[in-house]
Amino acid sequence: MIDYHLHGNFCGHATGELEEYVTSALEKGFDEIGFSAHLPKVIDPDPYHAMLEEDLPRYVDLVLSLQNRYSDRVLIKLGIEADYFEGHEEKTARLLDKYPFDYVLGSVHFLDDWHFTSRVGLPRYETEDPNEVFPRYYMLLKRMISTGLFDIAAHADAIRREHFQPPDTLENEYREVARLLSSNGMSIEVSTAGIRRGAGSIYPDLKLLGACIEAGVTVTLGSDAHRPEEVGLDYDEAFKALRRLGVTGIATYDRRKAVIKTLPVLNES
Ligand SMILES: [Zn+2]
Ligand SMILES: [Zn+2]
């Protein structure tokens, strides 16, 4: 079993030492995990959202030392979750190139000044217009994918919440996102965080995931754990979705190259 989206106390909104996540993963029988702390923001640094740039070398060293220390029990990958800030691609690329990351999650957490994935951004869902927000969100997501800076699209429709849905179908957007992921050689993350963050189901929506599978896009798995006990949370839901869509392979990453592994549990009927 694999969990490629683990945080830890390098940012202000997550808790727990990285080693506590390793312990939790071992208890739950994971054989491969990846840390994906938030990459320092390339604009307006904010230690609540992401570690500061001066902490990045310590993060990399710690993950590599855990990788070494636990090598006989669990495979630990050095990942990172990078925000997409339009117009700041070069600085993002420079930061990513400095370290030997196994994979880079690409994420949209901000829509202009709205940090919609954060607790402080929640009240704005009451006043924003989905007709206006969804097209803008998908535009940004597609630009993020097209930069070629990232390996995996994390929580690809995190803007979705149970009461915040587009009135019209997004099927054209889904097809376009799938096509872009495929042509950029990226994977899509199946994230169980949507279940506990107001979307009421996994990210992405099954229709978006289905469009991706149809386009041949590979899949990674993650809980987006911000506390050690959240490692692998709600994985039964993720497996259910993957089985329904006939997915049997999961993408893993090594120095930014995808390697597809078969998960035995996915073959259960
Ligand atoms: Zn976070
Ligand atoms: Zn995220």
Image: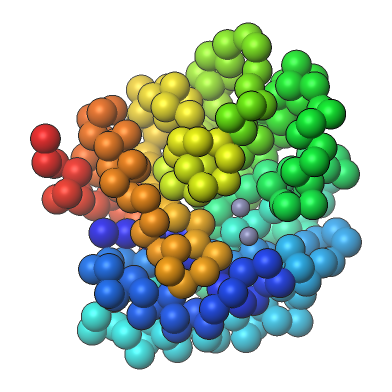
Q: Nearer the viewer, residue 178 or 136?
A: 136
**Can see residue 137?**
yes
| Residue sitting at x 44%, y 47% | 192
Picture residue at 41% right of the left edge, 64% below the top? 231
Visible residue check, residue 86: no
Q: Is residue 170 left or right of residue 34?
A: right
Q: Residue furthest top?
A: 168
Residue at image point 58% right, 30% down: 162
Tell me the residue at 73%/58% (across/down). Answer: 92
Q: Horizontally, is 249 left or right of 46 in the view?
A: left
Observer-nearest of 203 and 66 = 203
Residue 145 x, y percent position in the rendering: 61, 38
The quadrant the N terminus occupies is bottom left
Between residue 213 and residue 268, name the one nearer to us. Answer: 268
Residue 88 in percent (x, y) is at 81, 51
Residue 195 higher or lower than 95, as above or below:
above
Residue 40 horizontal/vertical position (percent) = 73, 67
